[in-house]
């Protein structure tokens, strides 16, 4: 599949380079550890990956992490909703952005170690 089609279909993948070639699939192993974006991943690991890289999330903190993410999402919601017209129609002022940033700061949960 071409890189263009991957983008059109929003197909997520990770690779260390773009290589033009014909596909030759040869399964060597499965249910084994692999290296993804420089990170060693084992079967059962919880990983998060995006265009910035790949991280491994300890299963012991996963439930707490989900709760914290929900709180952060709640705190950022005013900013994201206010910025949406800017990105779709160019209809926001810098003062409006400052107002919602202040609201976000008030909503932001306190981080604990």
Image (cartoon, rainbow, N blue to C red):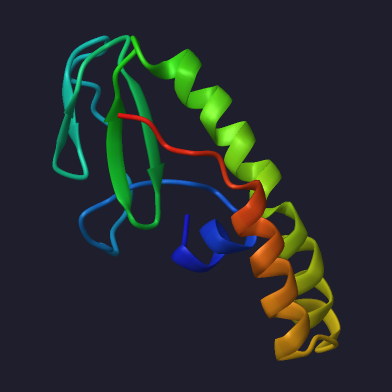
Q: Residue at x 39, y 35 (%)?
A: 48
Q: Residue at x 58, y 47 (%)?
A: 108
In the rendered view, tell whether residue 15 sits above or below residue 95: above
x%, y% of residue 32?
19, 12
Q: Quadrant of residue 3?
A: bottom left
Left or right: residue 82 compared with residue 65: right
Q: Nearer the viewer, residue 38 or 113?
A: 113
State left or right for residue 92 relative to residue 67: right
Examine the rendered structure and indicate whether residue 71 appears above or below residue 31: below
| Residue 102 image offset from top left, x and y in percent | 66, 66
Displayed quadrant of residue 18: bottom left
Q: Position of residue 19 (x, y in %)?
A: 25, 62
Left/right of residue 68 with respect to residue 35 in the rendered view: right
Please tell me whether residue 106 is drawn above or below residue 87 in the rendered image: above
Q: What residue lies at 55% left-to-right and 35% top-to-bottom?
A: 69
Q: Is residue 89 left or right of residue 63?
A: right
* Front in this rendered view, residue 37 or 23: 37
Camera sees residue 1: yes
Q: Quadrant of the C terminus?
A: top left
* Above or below, comparing residue 58 to residue 100 in the picture: above
């Amino acid at each position: 599949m071409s890189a263009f089609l991957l983008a059109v279909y929003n197909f997520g993948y990770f690779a260390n380079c773009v290589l033009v070639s014909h596909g030759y699939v040869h399964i060597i192993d499965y249910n084994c550890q692999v290296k993804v974006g420089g990170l060693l991943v084992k079967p059962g690991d919880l990983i998060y990956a995006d265009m910035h890289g790949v991280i491994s999330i300890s299963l012991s903190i996963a439930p707490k992490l989900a709760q914290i993410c929900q709180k952060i999402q709640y705190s950022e919601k005013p900013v994201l909703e206010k910025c949406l017209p800017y990105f779709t129609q160019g209809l926001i002022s810098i003062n409006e952005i400052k107002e919602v940033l202040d609201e976000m700061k008030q909503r932001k949960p306190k981080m604990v170690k």
